[in-house]
């Protein structure tokens, strides 16, 4: 049996950063019955420590859903298989000692911490969406709600994830984007 974790990541008070949270809400809203026992779909928001413990338990597939700056047009969806290899110069090994805040979520640090503690995640896929606005432009302190292009992308992301879950074999639904540095999460 394949265990799958779909993790919605983001801060709903920072505009498009709430993309992952909205996708998870929509996934739940579209279900008329419970998820199969091997599938967990959870809104982690900014709770990195909770995601850490879920991944430390071990999963065959982790689908992380988050806003992702990749210099595309707002609302562009990306399917990425990120590398957890450490990119800090001078560090020997794959994962450096990291601290995880219980009220902040840096997916790269969470994945490194899981690896450092001997946890195993079979495959990691990031469903990312190019944000238009985090609500912090021009001195603003944030805002709730997704921009129009990002809100439109939610349905496509939901369909992609549902297909991945249904197939239970992600390789048939995702083109390999190659390894990318952990910096792709930086907003």
Image (tube, helix red, strand yellow):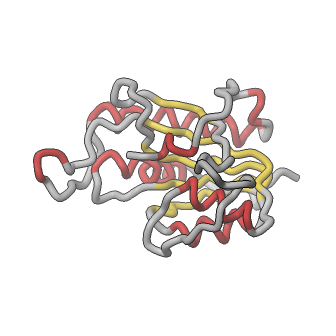
The residue sitting at 51% across, 52% down in the picture is 24
How far from the left and from the top, in percent, is residue 33? 64, 56
The residue at the point 57 percent across, 53 percent down is 108
Q: Residue furthest bottom?
A: 102
- How many labels were placed on the picture? 0
Toward which corner of the image does residue 100 lie, by quadrant? Answer: bottom right
Residue 138 in percent (x, y) is at 11, 46
Q: Is residue 138 left or right of residue 87?
A: left
- Reply above or below: 145 against 44: above
Closer to the camera in the image, 6 or 113: 113
Q: Is residue 53 above or below residue 28?
A: below
Q: Is residue 34 visible?
A: no
Q: Residue at x 35, y 36 (%)?
A: 150
Q: Is residue 56 above or below residue 186?
A: below
Outermost residue toward the right in this view: 1
Q: Position of residue 72 (x, y in %)?
A: 39, 25
Q: Nearer the viewer, residue 91 or 58?
A: 91
Q: Position of residue 125 (x, y in %)?
A: 65, 41
Which residue is found at the position 17% from the left and 58% from the top?
A: 141
| Residue 73 in view (yes/no) | yes
The answer to whether 178 appears left or right of 16 in the picture is right
The foreground one among 112 and 75 is: 112
Question: Residue 177's image quarter?
Answer: top right
């Amino acid at each position: 049996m394949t265990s799958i974790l779909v993790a919605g990541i983001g801060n709903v008070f920072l505009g498009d950063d709430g993309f992952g949270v909205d996708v998870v809400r929509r996934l739940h809203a579209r279900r008329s019955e419970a998820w199969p026992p091997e599938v967990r779909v959870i809104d982690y928001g900014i709770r990195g420590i909770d995601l850490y413990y879920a991944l430390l338990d071990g999963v065959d597939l982790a689908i992380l859903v988050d806003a992702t700056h990749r210099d595309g047009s707002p609302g562009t969806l990306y399917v990425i298989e990120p590398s957890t290899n450490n990119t800090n110069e001078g560090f020997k090994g794959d994962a450096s000692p990291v601290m995880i805040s219980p009220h902040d979520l840096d997916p790269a640090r969470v994945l490194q911490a899981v690896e450092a503690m001997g946890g195993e995640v079979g495959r990691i896929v990031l469903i990312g969406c190019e944000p238009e606005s985090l609500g912090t432009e021009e001195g603003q302190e944030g805002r709730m709600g997704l921009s129009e292009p990002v809100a439109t992308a939610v349905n496509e992301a939901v369909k992609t994830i549902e297909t991945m879950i249904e197939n239970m074999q992600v390789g048939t639904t995702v083109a390999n984007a190659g390894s990318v540095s952990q910096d792709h999460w930086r907003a």
